Image (cartoon, rainbow, N blue to C red):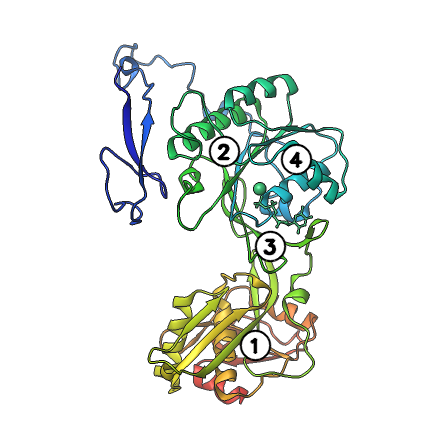
Amino acid sequence: MKIKTAFFCQNCGYESAKWTGKCPSCGQWNTFVEEKVQKDIPLRNAGWQPEKEHGAKSDNIVNLSEISGTEEERLLTPDAELNRVLGGGIVPGSLVLVGGEPGIGKSTLFLQNALLLKDITTLYISGEESAQQIKMRADRLQVKNDLFYLLTETSTQTIFQEIKKLRPQLVIVDSIQTLQSPFIESAPGSVSQIRETTAELQRFAKESHTPVFLIGHITKDGSIAGPKILEHMVDTVLQFEGDQHYAYRILRTIKNRFGSTAELGIYEMTGGGLRQVTNPSEILISQREDQLSGVAIAATIEGMRPMLVEVQALVTQSVYGTPQRTATGFDLRRLQLLLAVLEKRGGFHFGVKDVFLNIAGGIRVEDPSIDLAVLCALLSSYEDIPISSKICFAGEVGLSGEIRAVNRIEQRVAEAEKLGFEKIFISRYNKKGTDISKFNIEVIPVGRVDEVYRGLF
Ligand code: TYD
Ligand code: MG
């Protein structure tokens, strides 16, 4: 039998019959690798066959109204952040993919949660670390659990044999890139292996009603097949992110068949594992005595929670021909856009300045309402005039320099008031339909960039 091979893009999983330099699907270069594939679809049964009597119904087809519609009871973990991100606990039979860069704390998060789930049998399958290493980590976390089982194995065949014996109620696979199915010949971590092992685990999860968590590494250079190719196969995709040099980690929902994707969990990496952060605002604003220029506080909403975040900007005279722009925790293109708005609509000459922007705490903020604070931090550093630490901002900035309305403004204002802020700048368009009279904090509506400038300096 001739072995069939195909070329797969290791970044997005695109399949091609011949080698190509640039992936037509995701546009990455040099990502195609030849893999052996085995087509096991029996051609006889494929396609449409008009044999059955007209009107005869196969056993596989069920009438929707005959399915009992009771929502299955979710498994609640002791970790409120994880429960929320999953949409209210673990759904039986669900397949959850958790992606993140190496070293961010994925293994720690799931080891810790599995250990804390005291009443259910958990199987932790590790293809990356030895049993001793995991034991050392568990000792560090200082939790004991008699129903926690460990399996250091990479072959799905052996894994399923062990699962049949143990009958765990929760399975964690660390990581999907190390698994190997005996039915596929290519190396672990390749696109076809990842697809096949995930498909096997998916069948296991659905048939046995056991929730399965898959941990997957994301690498920037695409040397390991990215978990992106699995996103459509799993029920839920979570992303664990943060800056390795900071202690804060964010668990974000990217996709969820059982809940909202607007959820978010915040953790702090400590010497004894991950700690849930229930009040994020207080940690994300750095404590400072004297007022410095280039600092502005944004009243953002991440997930369903309001969160006050500190934006720091440094604007200096450019010494080289091309001015530098650097952004940490904020989209660089968005920064360039805001600088262009300031240049064109405000008449500020950022074209001859180096600009550095930083979001405190090493977190990445996706809420566009942070724009206004970024803009004010830039202006504050440009003018070298500090903004009072009792002022915060919530507004999106449009291309023509207008300050646009943002959602859930009342929640933002309430959070700012709770944290002792005295003034909050919001969009003028947000003022309509919002009852701001109930707040003690002074709400300042602004419509354009120049109004903000006049209001501040
Ligand atoms: P790890 O869970 O191994 O990351 P991943 O599985 O995503 O690759 O965690 C990596 C880092 O976490 C490592 O640098 C050590 C640190 N760590 C702590 O700071 N405190 C702890 O209690 C533990 C267990 C790990
Ligand atoms: Mg790990």
Disc 1 + disc 3, Cβ < 8 Å: no
**Mark with earlier residue (4, 3):** 4
Query: Looking at the picture, how far across and down is residue 303, in whole percent?
Result: 56, 56
Q: Taking 292 as reference, is 324 left or right?
A: left
Q: Taking 85 as reference, is 192 left or right?
A: left
Disc 1 + disc 4, Cβ < 8 Å: no
Query: Looking at the picture, how far across and down is residue 97, in whole percent?
Result: 51, 39
Instruction: From this view, report whether residue 157 is shown above or below residue 187.
Output: above
- Callout 3: CB less than 8 Å from ligand 1: no
Estimate the spatial distance between the alpha carbons at disc 1 and disc 3, rounded to whole Å: 22 Å
Instruction: From this view, report whether residue 315 is shown above or below residue 111.
Output: below
Mark 1 lies on residue: 296
Whether residue 91 appears in this view of the structure is yes
Instruction: From this view, report whether residue 375 is shown above or below residue 73.
Output: below
Q: Nearer the viewer, mark 4 or mark 3?
A: 3
Amino acid at pointer 4:
Leu
Query: Looking at the picture, how far across and down is residue 329, in whole percent?
Result: 50, 64
Residue 230, picture quadrant: top left
Mark 4 lies on residue: 75
Amino acid at pointer 1:
Ala
Estimate the spatial distance between the alpha carbons at disc 4 and disc 3, rounded to whole Å: 23 Å
Q: Nearer the viewer, mark 2 or mark 1?
A: 2
Instruction: From this view, report whether residue 199 is shown above or below residue 451.
Output: above
> Residue 249 got which mark?
3
Q: Nearer the viewer, residue 400 or 295?
A: 295
Mark 2 lies on residue: 178
> Residue 145 got which mark?
none
Identify the secondary structure beneath mark 2.
helix
Identify the secondary structure beneath mark 3.
strand
**Mark with earlier residue (1, 4):** 4
Estimate the spatial distance between the alpha carbons at disc 2 and disc 1, rounded to whole Å: 44 Å
